[in-house]
Image (cartoon, rainbow, N blue to C red):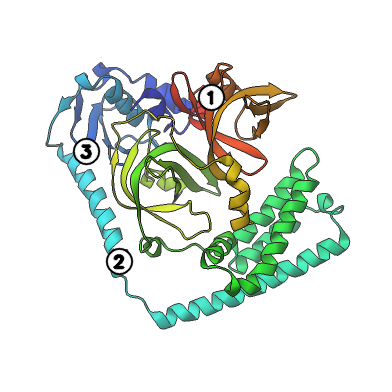
């Protein structure tokens, strides 16, 4: 575990600064660790020290301080001390009660959740009735979308930029009412495209074409292959339950954590974690959700962590999202070697044929030189070809600086037009670019 990986867990730069001020063993009268946890007591303003503990299997934190940030400055400081000065900690097979009780409670909750999902009785009749009602609502929503698209083609796109935000919000709300949250997100994407600077009509037309294809495909979904039906359902916002996914055939490998990113929308935290199988060369993505007030319940894997065991993939023509099966996390590793084999970004057209609604898909771009020209970032290959790098969520400077002007392999998500860079292998190792953004 290295410093950069730990600081990548910080909720903001203020927490990083505060944690650094506590990186002194004199501030911690008690420091200890076992095979499953790290703990410490930190002097505070009150008479009693703050009790801080970290579950090493999943990098979960808990602290008795009143901070609402997660992890708090004490958790970050404790992890930094442990990573860089283990000699200052006492090793013990027996944790203090305030540590062991928390760990046992976490394990019991996880087991209870698994047992509940496994033993929950199924009311087949009620389930069929709910599904029938949902199918009716969804068909109504798809029909409304098809009618809206017909009107749009008849009137033309020229009036769309003048539409008020409420126009799009109302349409998105009607899709939600029709049990089509995925379509609601697509509608919001259309309004976002119109708000962006520059000429986005081509992107708008492409997105509308996808919606048209979707509206045509849904009534004929029974004629599609099973995996294509699954992609269509996921696009509409109908996601298979985890207990159903766990029934699929597992893929066993040693999975290396390449990157992790949090996003927030209306107080809902979405954590995406990208993995690569060392033997299979296969990508996987774990997705977790939590309310902003429950961020501490999300598992935090650090870049370089190994997950040894089985993943179960959601059905798809291009399987990517997965659920953890029987596995264990090895947090002793922090290095990420350059993979020897992986899917090529040039295979994207084939993935697109299998799923015409495919957006971004993880790829590794082999050694290419980052270059900045005409306010655009590119990756240039030795043969003179180049691909664009999307800088809307990441400034160009970290990638340029880390490469040192040399060709470097880059991990990211490719949509057929540009790469959203997530990590880079450079002379000093591997760095996730989102972590670098937070700690510059």
Task: Left or right? Give the position of 210 relative to 225.
Answer: right
Task: Left or right? Give the position of 341 relative to 104.
Answer: right
In this rendering, the count of numbered labels is 3
Asked if 373 appears above or below 118 in the picture, the reply is above
Q: Say whether disc 3 or disc 1 marks the residue closer to the N-terminus.
A: 3
CA gap between label 2 and label 1 equals: 46 Å
The residue pinned by badge 2 equals: 118
The N terminus, quarter of image: top left
The residue pinned by badge 1 equals: 408
Residue 175 drawn at (x, y percent): 64, 65
Local packing at callout 1 (Cα closer than 10 Å; few below 14, some 14-19, many 20+) is many
Q: Are marks 3 and 1 in contact (CB under 8 Å)?
A: no
CA gap between label 2 and label 3 equals: 27 Å
Please name whichever residue, 14 or 439, is drawn nearer the observer in this view of the structure. 439
Quarter holding residue 127: bottom left
Q: Is residue 360 visible?
A: no
Please name whichever residue, 127 or 318, is drawn nearer the observer in this view of the structure. 318
- Image mark for residue 108: none
Residue 348 drawn at (x, y percent): 60, 46
Asked if 259 appears above or below 209 in the picture, the reply is above
- Kindly state the secondary structure of the residue where label 3 is placed: loop
Asked if 131 appears above or below 69 in the picture, the reply is below
- Image mark for residue 36: 3
Of tags 3 and 1, the one toward the viewer is: 1
Q: Say whether disc 2 or disc 3 marks the residue closer to the N-terminus.
A: 3
- Kindly state the secondary structure of the residue where label 1 is placed: strand
């Amino acid at each position: 575990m290295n410093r950069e990986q730990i600081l990548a867990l910080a909720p903001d730069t203020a927490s990083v600064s505060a944690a650094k001020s506590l990186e002194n063993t004199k501030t911690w009268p008690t420091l200890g660790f076992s095979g499953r946890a790290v703990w410490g007591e930190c002097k505070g303003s009150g008479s009693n020290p703050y009790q801080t503990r970290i579950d090493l299997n999943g990098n979960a934190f808990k602290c008795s301080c009143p901070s609402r940030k997660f992890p708090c400055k004490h958790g970050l400081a404790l992890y930094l001390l442990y990573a860089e000065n283990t000699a200052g900690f006492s090793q013990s097979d027996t944790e203090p009660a305030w540590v062991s009780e928390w760990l046992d409670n976490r394990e019991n909750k996880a087991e209870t959740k698994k047992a509940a999902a496994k033993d929950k009785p199924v009311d087949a009749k009620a389930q069929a009735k709910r599904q029938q009602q949902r199918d009716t609502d969804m068909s109504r929503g798809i029909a409304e979308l098809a009618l809206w698209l017909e009107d749009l083609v008849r009137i033309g796109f020229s009036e769309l930029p003048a539409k008020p935000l409420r126009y799009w919000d109302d349409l998105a709300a009607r899709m939600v009412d029709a049990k089509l949250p995925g379509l609601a997100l697509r509608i919001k994407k259309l309004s976002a495209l119109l708000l962006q600077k520059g000429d986005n009509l081509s992107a708008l037309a492409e997105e509308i074409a996808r919606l048209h294809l979707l509206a045509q495909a849904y009534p004929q979904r029974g004629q599609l292959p099973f995996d294509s039906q699954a992609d269509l359902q996921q696009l509409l916002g109908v996601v298979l339950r985890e207990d159903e996914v766990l029934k699929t055939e597992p893929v066993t490998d040693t999975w290396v954590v390449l990157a992790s990113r949090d996003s927030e929308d209306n107080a809902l935290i979405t954590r995406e974690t990208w993995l690569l199988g060392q033997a299979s060369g296969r990508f996987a993505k774990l997705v977790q959700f939590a309310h902003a007030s429950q961020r501490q319940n999300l598992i935090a894997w650090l870049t370089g962590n190994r997950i040894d065991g089985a993943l179960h993939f959601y059905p798809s023509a291009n399987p990517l999202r997965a659920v953890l099966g029987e596995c264990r996390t090895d947090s002793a590793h922090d290095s990420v070697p350059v993979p020897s084999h992986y899917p090529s970004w040039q295979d994207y057209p084939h993935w697109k044929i299998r799923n015409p609604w495919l957006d971004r898909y993880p790829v590794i771009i082999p050694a290419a030189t980052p270059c900045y020209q005409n306010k655009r970032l590119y990756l240039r290959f030795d043969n003179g070809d180049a691909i664009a790098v999307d800088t809307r969520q990441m400034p160009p400077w970290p990638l340029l600086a880390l490469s040192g002007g040399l060709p470097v392999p880059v991990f990211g998500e490719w949509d057929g037009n540009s790469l959203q860079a997530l990590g880079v292998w450079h002379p000093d190792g591997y760095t996730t670019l989102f972590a670098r953004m937070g700690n510059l």
